[in-house]
Image (tube, helix red, strand yellow):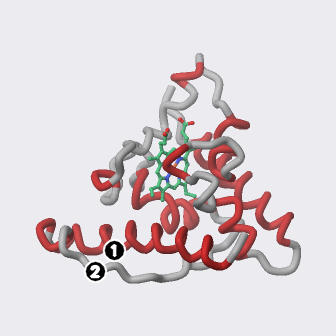
Amino acid sequence: MTGADCSRWLLLIAIAAALCTVMLIAPVAAQQAGIKVVPAPRTAASSPEEMFKSYCASCHGLDAKGKGPAAAALKTPPGDLTTLARANGGKFPELRVLNSISGDSHVPAHGSKDMPVWGSVFRDMASGSPGGETQLRLRNLTKYIGSLQVK
Ligand code: HEC
């Protein structure tokens, strides 16, 4: 992945974060909000709660039901991540979830060939053993989403 690709994805995170901050204060101002580019904050790979809050909640909502502050600005609404098992005959579609987070399956809003996806963001963030840390982040996020499933 090139640096340019990376900053484009980080920009998207920044837009979500900017919307998140601004919309709490003044919904009207959000439409004129300037866009500030910030790198994805570093989180503990062992803490899916922290990762979800930092990287996912702006779109999916803190409760993962798809109503994050940036959701309204997206063309495709972020899905409700708590009903994935129910929609799949009661079985949590673990592999599909893992792949859509990493970007191996092409969830369009998560990235196309032009836009990096979480797998590559996490890989860039990793130090030491990028492969292991990236897998740990993806696995822990997947497990966390699995634990949020409604019956
Ligand atoms: C910029 C907004 C945005 C962010 C940030 C975001 N998502 Fe998504 N996500 C979406 C949208 C929109 C969809 C639905 C896309 C589609 O189905 O076409 C989606 C779909 C998904 C799916 C697929 C659900 C299914 O039906 O299989 C999973 C899993 C998911 N997101 C997890 C995450 C996780 C975990 C994070 C944080 C690491 C995250 N998302 C961050 C917008 C976002």
The amino acid sitting under disc 2 is Gly
**Which dot marks residue 18?**
1
Q: How many labels were placed on the picture? A: 2
Assess mark 2: CB under 8 A from ligand 1?
A: no
The residue tagged with tag 2: helix, strand or loop? loop
Q: Do the residues under discs 2 and 1 have CB atoms within 8 angstroms?
A: yes
The spot of residue 79 in percent (x, y) is 44, 39
Q: Is residue 145 above or below residue 132?
A: above
User: Is 39 above or below relative to 139?
Assistant: below
Kind of element beneath mark 1: helix
Please, what is the three-letter code of the amino acid marked with disc 1? Ala
Graded by Cα atoms within 10 Å as few (under 14), some (14 to 19) or many (20 or more), the crowding at tag 2 reads few
From the image, tell me which residue sits under label 2.
34
Q: Nearer the viewer, residue 114 or 30?
A: 114
Residue 25 lies in what quarter of the image?
bottom left
122 vs 11, nearest the viewer: 11
Q: Nearer the viewer, residue 133 or 110?
A: 110
